[in-house]
Image: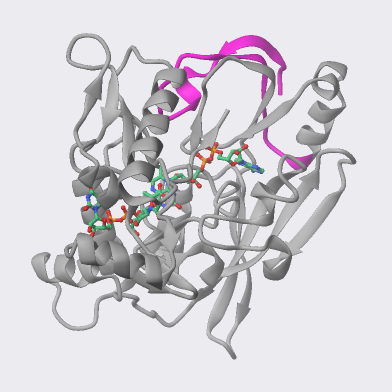
Amino acid sequence: MLLEENVSLRPYNTFGLDVTARYFACFASADELRELLQLPQVQAADKLILGGGSNVLFTQNYAGAVLKNEVMGLEIIAEDPETGTALVRAGAGEGWHGFVEYALGQNLSGLENLSLIPGTVGAAPLQNIGAYGAELRDTFERLEAVEIATGLLRIFGTDACGFGYRESVFKKELKGQYVVTAVVLRLHRTPRPNVRYGAIAETLAALGVAGEPTPHDVSRAVVHIRRSKLPDPAVVGNAGSFFKNPEVSQAKFDVLKAQYPEMPGYLVPGGVKVPAGWLIEKAGFKGLRRGAGAGTHGVHDRQALVLVHHGGATGRDIEALAHDIIAAVGQQFGIELHAEVNIL
Ligand code: FAD
Ligand code: EPU
């Protein structure tokens, strides 16, 4: 729980950007967090709670205190035979994929579609993580969070979290006010395979799975798809999808579809969701490299929604590229992209 000064954050962000934090400390429990919050240096400073650093872009050194969540623990806290569910509590510092594997190992289903998402359990509610037809809120029961101003523990149920597509109250009204210390999910004892997302069924067939897939099969398929599309941050710096997929009105979609008949779109309440990866690819950015030599940063060549750091770029370089993409997509399609990644 040592408070260090001028610490490099390079190992702590998946873009691999070499910035420093004025103060840096890890905490392994809610009490350790409270102790840190009472230190005069921390009290006086801006505070950033960091998990795995897989959804942040540092554009400058962080002048405040970075507090890294290392609250561990995985535990089944209740069984409900009537509904065939179990409540599982995870410490917020646990790795998300480790939690998914723990659930699978306990014969609990509900998280398999969210396999291999990087980062920690505690950050998962922040943007209601989602992938391959599932979202955190589908299994969410409650979370425990410490209020930064008072040190008090508060329990948030689903309604209080205000979950939306890559959204929660913790990114809006309560931004920067709470530290999530544990999450409780309700998982199923009877497997409920969710293979609505087309690529999963195709991949299961390609992997030779016939008949009803098990949760392990679905997890294996999701891991397979993700590895084929998304860059591994251990190899090339990135934070997953840099932008959210935008939603447009049906009328606007019809106009664009007349101009671009191959444009994909998915009906959502109130409009149509358009894949930002398609828009960025169409705008000519896919595989782009910028910077010295073979390029220091750019756009992933297999997934245009992912901005990548090859080495030698700054966060500002990546932010400038993001601005150029927003401008180009805005000009060509009249659609405004919004960052999913937290830009600091
Ligand atoms: P960090 O990057 O450390 O933090 C993210 C934000 O949450 C910051 O604002 C931080 O201050 C805040 N925060 C973190 N922990 C806490 C806490 N305990 N209490 C309060 N605030 C906190 N996301 C998806 O939804 N779906 C995907 O399919 C997906 N795929 C990805 C693939 C790759 C290759 C990568 C690199 C990222 C992907 N992401 C995806 C994004 C990312 O993994 C998730 O957003 C993840 O939940 C971030 O976790 P983290 O611990 O790394 O958060
Ligand atoms: N597409 C292209 N070109 C590209 C990329 C995508 O044309 O370069 C089009 C294709 O039509 C494809 C469609 O976009 O069918 C959707 O692509 P994909 O299935 O890869 O999903 P995505 O919409 O790009 C979203 C999430 C991911 C999540 C996947 C799977 C957002 C912002 N991103 O990506 O989440 O893993 O679906 O469910 O919603 C993240 O949030 O960091 C993330 C990786």
Question: Residue shown at 22%/55% (left/top)?
Answer: 225
Question: Residue shown at 81%/55% (left/top)?
Answer: 154
Where in the figure is residue 240, as x and y percent of width and height? 37, 42
Task: Report the residue that reaches farthest toward the bottom.
Answer: 82
Question: Residue shown at 72%/16% (left/top)?
Answer: 3
* Viewer-side residue, 270 vs 194: 270
Residue span colored magenta: 1-30
* Viewer-side residue, 59 vs 230: 59
- Residue 85, placed above or below residue 124: below
Task: Quadrant for the N terminus, please.
Answer: top right
Membership of 108 in magenta stretch: no
Q: Is residue 108 visible?
A: no
* Viewer-side residue, 186 vs 315: 315
Q: Is residue 176 visible?
A: yes
- Residue 281, placed above or below residue 99: above
Number of numbered tags placed on the structure image: 0
Q: Is residue 37 left or right of residue 97?
A: right
Which colouring convention does the figure follow?
one colour
* Viewer-side residue, 159 vs 210: 159
Membership of 12 in magenta stretch: yes
Where in the figure is residue 197, as x and y percent of width and height? 29, 70
- Residue 330 placement: quadrant: top left
Where in the figure is residue 20, as x and y percent of width and height? 57, 13
Task: Quadrant for the C terminus, please.
Answer: top right
Where in the figure is residue 108, as x and y percent of width and height? 45, 71
Q: Is residue 206 left or right of residue 236?
A: left
Q: Is residue 125 left or right of residue 209?
A: right
- Residue 7, placed above or below residue 150: above
